[in-house]
Image (cartoon, rainbow, N blue to C red):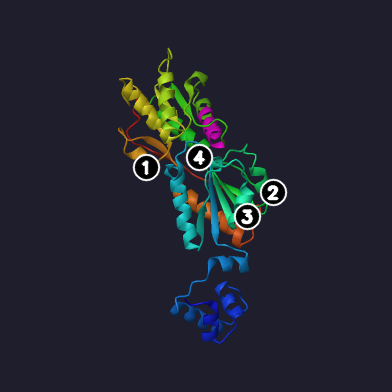
Amino acid sequence: MTTIKDIAQIANVSTTTVSRVINNYPDVSDKTRKKIKKIIQEKNYRPNSVARSLSTNKSNSIGIFFTDHFNSGLHHPFFREVIYGMEKSLGNKGYDIVYFTNRHWGEKFSYVEKCKDRNVDGVALMGVLKNDPNIKKLLNSNIPSVFVDVDISGNYSSYVISDNIEGSKKAINYLYDLGHRKIGMLMGIDTSKTSQDRLKGYKQALTELNLSFNKDWVFDGKYSEEGGYKAIKNMLKLRSYPTAIFCQSDGMAIGAMKAIEDSSLKITDDFSIIGFDDIEASRYVKPPLTTIAQNKEKMGSSVSKLLIKMIEEKKQNVDPIKLPVKLIKRESCSKI
């Protein structure tokens, strides 16, 4: 196997010079750099990543923490696509991804210690809540970090989020245009920033349309199909219930549709349902689900963009990114 010493001997230079070319240091002449790179290519030399990280204090790897509240792991329909967007953009920049195991599987946990143990250059955090006690230590460190779907920031931290307030308003306005005046909602996790913003958008839209807010029409759907199913079953026990339901996630919407069907009722005839996220399954349920689409792949590439800026450009206090959302009209909503 070819070593850095072999490359140096063939090029008639020192191993230090070869190392400087590999690590893109500027103080090597163009002629020497070109010669060394040609030899490296001919010999199919691959630097040892561990040795390289020791010499440069850079591992070219990004950590991912995914706090999974539903035990779905990488099958999670939303975060799976975000990670895919990260993977594509980071791969083009020469970075690998280190996926940290779920923090709930161990008694002792620290984001900072995990990052240091694996020597990652930066970290993305998904599914975390603002009240997580471990976050403060990470924010006080110099580890570049980007939060997904929650607005947490610091000197070395930023976030990527969708315009959840505007997304909710789009959903309610669409239902209103179809003639609905009794519009309910299924909540996600009420302690999360995402859920609160979607609730805020829901309330704002009702106010702007001169519709009253009825707290009895807001149910906890727990961001899951099972939660959506149970929420609708509880809603149907009410003396008066809405004709349209805005669900804060597609998973809840799919569960809600199943509950309506199992109650001998029909989507569009008895209820209009609209979701949020535009996960892949939303296109294939019957009827196909109308939803507010988040650009999940773009979200992943935006996370990568912020991390690269902090890592390679040594930027601090990087501005967060808010991504637009759009209404996807399918067949689960109809005029009343």
Outermost top residue: 239
Cα distance between the residues tagged 4 and 1: 19 Å
Q: What element carries label 3?
A: helix
Q: Residue at left 64%, top 50%?
A: 112
Q: Determine which of the numbered discs, if any, sits on residue 310 in the image.
A: none
Give, as a single range, the part of the protein colored magenta.
193-203
Outermost bottom residue: 12
Dot 4 or dot 2, earlier in sequence: 4
Asked if residue 295 shows in the view, the reply is no
Cα distance between the residues tagged 3 and 1: 36 Å
Q: Residue at left 40%, top 41%?
A: 279
> What residue would you read off at disc 1?
280
Cα distance between the residues tagged 4 and 3: 22 Å
> What residue would you read off at disc 3?
116
Question: Of helix, strand and loop, which mostly describes the magenta segment?
Answer: helix
> What residue would you read off at disc 4?
68
Binning the other alpha carbons within 10 Å of mark 2 as few (below 14), some (14 to 19) or many (20 upward) gives: few
Q: Does the magenta stretch include residue 135?
A: no
